Image: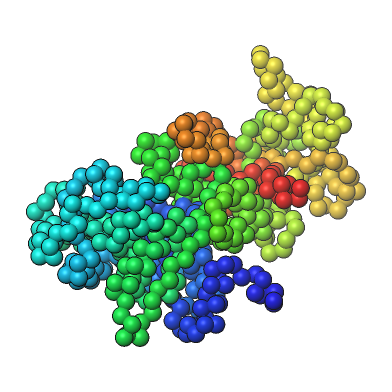
Amino acid sequence: MSEEKKSLNFLEQIIEEDLANGLPKEKLRFRFPPEPNGYLHIGHAASICLNFGLGLKYNAPVNLRFDDTNPAKEEQEYVDSIQHDVHWLGFQWDQVLYSSDYFQQLYDWTIALIKEGKAYVDDQSSEAMAIQKGTPTEPGTNSPNRDRSIEENLELFLKMKNGEFDEGSHVLRAKIDMKHTNMHMRDPIMYRILKKHHHRTGNDWCIYPMYDWTHGESDYIEQISHSICTLEFKSHRDLYDWYVDQVFDETKLELRPKQREFARRNLSYTVMSKRKLLQLVEEGVVNGWDDPRMPTISGLRRRGYTANSIRTFSDTAGISKRDNVTDVALLEHCIKDDLNKTAPRVMAVLNPVKVVITNYPKDKEEFLNANYNDYEEGFGSRPVPFSKELYIEKEDFREEANKKFFRLKLGKEVRLKNAYIIKAESCIKDENGEVTEIHCTYDENSLSGSGSEASKRKVKGTLHWVSIKHAEKAEVRVYDRLFTDEAPDGHKDKDFKEFLNPDSLNTIEAFVEPSLKTAKELDRFQFQRLGYFCVDKDTTSEKLVFNRTVPLRDSWAKMDSK
């Protein structure tokens, strides 16, 4: 077996087998079929990357088809956001289509099924139908309405369509087999009454097809070769095939679509149910679908994740046949790896303490040249102002410390990044014993890059800093995981919101170097020694707002090395 064959995932193997068995390559066509009832999340990104990735691999078209069969939950806002997310991830669809495009064709096929005695109207309660459906180990029993005449079923279904019945009073069911071992085949519902305004068809319809009836028929209409679904639809495959059997015409040169399933992407320390994510939004737990703590694509984008990092994550996590949970640390590793190659390095202080350089001239200021990346070429540089009074991080100073503390301590030296070597001489404290000011001296001959002997002196610690006189205030939102539990919705006896992390957002006032004043929304930076940060959409000309994407520490790399 060749290396290329070994690298194929199981879905690619299925496609390769179909091609080897005579399927013309030009007949390959895929689709991504989201329901527009919420914003897409990282799990959907896996499906997007899979389907559009297959399209790229085989040079085959991919449709973006909206499964818009439930007007009670669907909105144009979601349609727009889904299109934006797919484009942002770097993919282009062949056609934008909607299940609602096929409402008339589905209705016409349904009339034909009723005339063939393969569908009937049932006016029982949902509770009664559930009891009759039986259990996985016990067969179901027939509805008392199952043997209605074709004429009566046609008349009742027309009344359903014309809005003459209340919601929930009547449904149309396929007549298959109430004793089938697969419960989805036990006379499934095909249509229900929903007197709701549809975002595309308005009030033209008050009956709407169920997903199972719509799915395969839409694939057939669009001539999708491989209908790739998540694993929960595997038990629906029998029904998918039965429905397609009812409309497939062997006399025409048409393709019969094939459904195959892969395991959905689950991520630790979050929830992937759109219903639960909507709950977080509606209850104000988060600030909208694009809150940077959300696993939505829009939330990840706002937090600073790149399209490349999400595509890399999807590729690295791979495609599986079995349900599994991917550690969020892998996602964090992918964005760190991407930003390490692309993000300019700048200086910001999040927890400031004042440093006074006592032997530096009071009115002097310098603009020091600082590279945006010391390790890669092509990033350029910028001038960074230096003056007598600076901010450094509070945790970078101790009055006394052991030999392993390589930052600033009394009587010892450190280098200020891109600047001078300083020595801590004394400090001032407030009434609570907190250090409020550190007095230092500097070696004026030790300027980084000056070539002097003093500049070449080796000191073990290097600190980031900002000049107080020139610093820009910024609001920095430090995000942590939204949940404290690895599987917040995995506890049968507890609500998933019991595991919400009270410290998932910490907003602080920080000070950043003045070059960031002109930063624009979604610009990404490494704040040296602190992490990766992104300019938030709340930024204005008067106020800079940054979101922490991820800290520098890479927990996945440590786990991977073990």
Residue 36: tell me if it is visible: no
In which quadrant will I find the N terminus?
Answer: bottom right
Q: Position of residue 453 (x, y in %)?
A: 91, 48
Q: Is residue 56 left or right of residue 252?
A: right
Q: Is residue 448 left or right of residue 530?
A: right
Name the quadrant containing residue 378: bottom right
Q: Position of residue 454 (x, y in %)?
A: 88, 45
Q: Position of residue 457 (x, y in %)?
A: 89, 45
How many labels, in total? 0
Residue at 38% of width from left, 40% of height from top? Answer: 279
Q: Position of residue 344 (x, y in %)?
A: 64, 54
- Residue sticking out furthest to the right: 453
Q: Is residue 528 left or right of residue 234?
A: right
Residue at 40% of width from left, 71% of height from top? Answer: 63
Q: Is residue 558 left or right of residue 108?
A: right
Name the quadrant containing residue 268: top right
Residue at 74% of width from left, 55% of height from top? Answer: 374
